[in-house]
Image (tube, grey):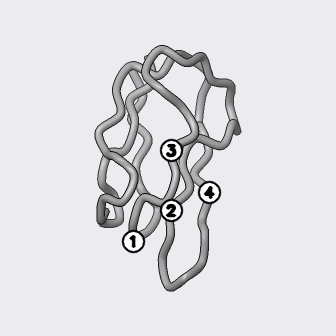
Amino acid sequence: MAELTSPIAGKVWKIMVAVGDKVEMDDELIILEALKMETPVYSEESGTVSAIMIKEGDPINEGDILISIG
């Protein structure tokens, strides 16, 4: 199981997937916002989204776990 972590501190702007969705490597999963700039977060491997640890609007720190992919 892989864990997708936040590359930056900011806020969760949009979640593009749901638990149970199949994803491929390099699919856009989440968009983060920091300093009024949007930063997409991409899947690092293929699999199925098994858990989403955040919700839209949540503040996050660099390194926080966002999604688990199994």
Asked whether 50 or 17 is in front, the reply is 17
Residue holding disc 2 = 32
Mark 1 in CB contact with mark 4 (< 8 angstroms): no
Figure disc tally: 4
What is the CA distance from the residue labelled 2 to the residue labelled 1?
7 Å
Q: Nearer the viewer, mark 4 or mark 3?
A: 3
**Nearer the N terminus, badge 2 or badge 4?**
2
Image point (60%, 78%), residue name: 37
**Nearer the N terminus, badge 1 or badge 4?**
1
Q: Amino acid at mark 4?
A: Pro
Q: Residues within 10 Å of mark 1 (few under 14, many from 20)?
A: many
Q: Quadrant of residue 25?
A: top right
Residue holding disc 1 = 10
What is the CA distance from the residue labelled 2 to the residue labelled 4?
6 Å
What is the CA distance from the residue labelled 3 to the residue labelled 2?
9 Å
Q: Nearer the viewer, mark 1 or mark 3?
A: 3
**Nearer the N terminus, badge 1 or badge 3?**
1
Asked whether 8 or 13 is in front, the reply is 13
Residue holding disc 3 = 15
Q: Residues within 10 Å of mark 2 (few under 14, many from 20)?
A: many
Q: Amino acid at mark 3?
A: Ile
Asked whether 27 or 58 is in front, the reply is 58
Q: Amino acid at mark 2?
A: Leu
Asked whether 36 or 63 is in front, the reply is 36
- Tag 2 secondary structure: strand
Q: Amino acid at mark 1?
A: Gly
Residue holding disc 4 = 40
